[in-house]
Image: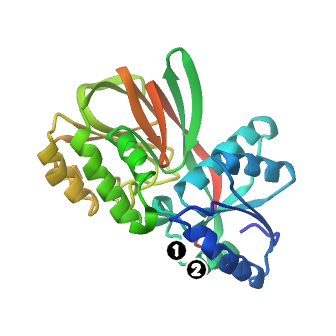
Amino acid sequence: MVQSKKVHAIINPHAGYGKAGKRWPLILEYLQSSGFDVTWRLTERRWHASDIAQEYAREGARLIISVGGEGVMNEIVNGLFNYKKTSGTMPTLAMIPAGTGTDLSRTLHISKEYRKAVDLIKNGREMLMDAGRMVFEREGRTWTRYFINAADTGLGGAVARLSNSLPKVLGGFLTFLLASLAALLSFRRMKLQIWVDDKLVDSGLMTIVGALNGQYFGGGMHAAPMAVVDDGIMEFMYVKDTNFIKFISKVLARVYAGEHLAYHKVYLCKGRQLKVVSEKVFLAEVDGEVERARTIHLDIVPKSVSILVAK
């Protein structure tokens, strides 16, 4: 692990329906009693975590702790990739899961119990994990966003938009399940082209197209049981030509147990690059945050993020 006891924490106090903010004093006390000298800040707006992470990095931070859900971690990662463009380096990351979406922590076996998460920070090891880089195109404009767990287009974007508006007191599982059911009621499949590693692999009416680095997304859906976060490969998955009833019974009802891949309308391919093209603007979801685009280009950035995991 990082030898210095000096750590920098970024906390989204609203994560998990305010759970992160309420628990932070207890987390801070336990960090300090565990021998850490903690510099910390609460986020106050969207993308604030990105700005704070870059400030910390410029000040020489060696370890940044994300306290919250997937959203704050994603902002931190994006901020540090921006910092890396000029510095060539970035600090090591650690997680104390305290949000609605804690799917990456499931893959990395990081406990939601804050004392265990802090103990891992104290005794864990550094692992270099892959990240995904997505370039969005819409109406002549392009922009880039990084992710380390999962991204998808189609239904996933609609679910993320709804789940972000639901009361998080329901917890991650119910929030994402209810958002998925509600989104399905109004969702219309989109005609998309899917390219993997510069080859057209399919086109037609798609419900969802996902890119998974971690094994879980959507509040516990075991979407990619075979995924490995540091193998230089991403799992690309899509569902094509299925209806409302079949999607619920064959995909949604089975995905939490990782059994959805048995359905013949679920397609899986592995690769390093993904392109999704549509005639219309579609919603995309990146580690739980929503974007709108007509074309996305995704490529993997192998072993680019240092993160603390259990020995």
Q: How many marks?
A: 2
Labels 2 and 1 touching (C-beta < 8 A)? yes
Q: Horizontal placement of 7 versus 227: left or right?
A: right
Residue at 44% across, 41% down: 285
Q: Secondary structure at mark 1?
A: loop
Q: Is residue 230 visible?
A: yes
Residue 116, label in figure: 2
Which amino acid type is marked by label 1?
Ser
What residue lies at 48% left-to-right and 27% top-to-bottom? Answer: 297
Name which residue type carries label 2.
Lys
Tell me the residue that label 1 is attached to: 111
Measured from the top left, where is residue 111 in percent x and y? 52, 74
The image quadrant of residue 226 is bottom left
Residue name at image x 70 percent, y 82 percent: 30
Say which of 83 and 55 sits in front: 55
Q: Residue furthest toward the top?
A: 140
Residues packed near mark 2 inside 10 Å, few (<14), some (14 to 19) or many (20 plus): few
